[in-house]
Image (spheres, rainbow, N blue to C red):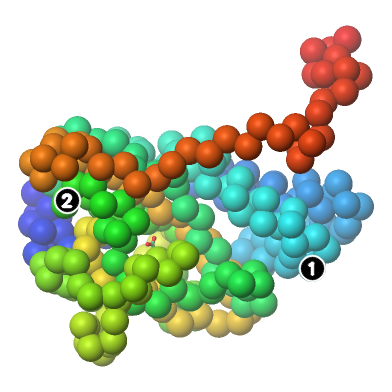
Amino acid sequence: MEDLVAFYKKNGFVVLKSCHQLTALELVREEVHQLFKVQLKYLNRRVESGQTDKVMHHNMSSLFYADIERYKSCLRQASKLVSVFKLISSNSILEFLKIAGLNVLSFPTDAVFHCMAGGLKLPGGYMRIPAHQDWPAIQSSLDSVVVWSTLMDIQSQLFFPLEVIPGSHLGGLLKGNSTDHFYEISTGEFDADSFVPLFVDKCDVIIFSSFLVHQTGLGNDDKLRLAFSTRYENVIEPTNIERSFPNIHRRVVDRDLAKTQPPNLKDVSMIFGE
Ligand SMILES: O=C(O)CCC(=O)C(=O)O
């Protein structure tokens, strides 16, 4: 573990090989896939059976074209699954973070689900993410990290690999612009030829500094790549104490019952077996 931490400090990222238990990873895959399948079934659409990447891509595409709002709800819901939370806060990950010096951990925000798939770009959304840094989306401890985990093996440029510029975290916050989704680094601030694609298996985990310059690599239109990332901050990092534990994420609760349809008594009774 010490060698991995030394590598991380120098390069700003590290790959924890075979970090996940395959069963925990498969559970996430199944649950994510299930979200799309139950919505398709609800809409009386055909559901392809099987758990391969191809089948998942097919079922996701069917929902995308059948009802894009339900498709978006599935993407939103995926990052909130308890199975995802368990995966990205496993003992191996927490142990690495402790040894790296993050002593009191907290989550500055929720996990993010990254869906890169040929043909499934949301209107007004994005597909591949250009060169950016994540610190502006956290703004708390300077040693905050991103933990990134994929649901499929990424063994070539066809699968939208995460690409990083090793050592770029040492330059701190670079000049850039905040867009709705990320802090894009200005061209001229980095050398586009220095990006290195990280090819990983689905049980591997990538941990990187929130200052590391990274982007989504190339992919192929017929491929699906699903991944999650979460951020960890070190609450007691000295500048975080000095800045009074900054918190840039706001919780908004929409209590308008009309939007989700109020429950009727018959359905509630069914839940409790009456
Ligand atoms: O999954 C990707 O391709 C990009 C992820 C990313 O940029 C992030 O988690 O900050």
Q: With respect to residue 18, does 152 lie above or below?
A: below
Instruction: Name the quadrant where ligand 1 sits.
Output: bottom left
Disc 1: CA contacts within 10 A as few (<14), some (14-19) or many (>=20): few
Kind of residue sitting beneath label 1: Tyr
- Residue behind mark 1: 65
Residue 1 at x, y = what percent?
Answer: 14, 47
Q: Is the CB of the residue bearing disc 1 within 8 angstroms of ligand 1? A: no
SS under mark 1 = helix
Kind of residue sitting beneath label 2: Asp
SS under mark 2 = loop
Say which mark, if any, is on residue 128: none
Q: Nearer the viewer, residue 135 or 82?
A: 135
- Residue behind mark 2: 143
Q: With respect to residue 251, does 225 lie above or below?
A: below
Q: With respect to residue 244, does 269 lie above or below?
A: above
Disc 2: CA contacts within 10 A as few (<14), some (14-19) or many (>=20): many
Residue at 83 percent of width and 63 percent of height: 66
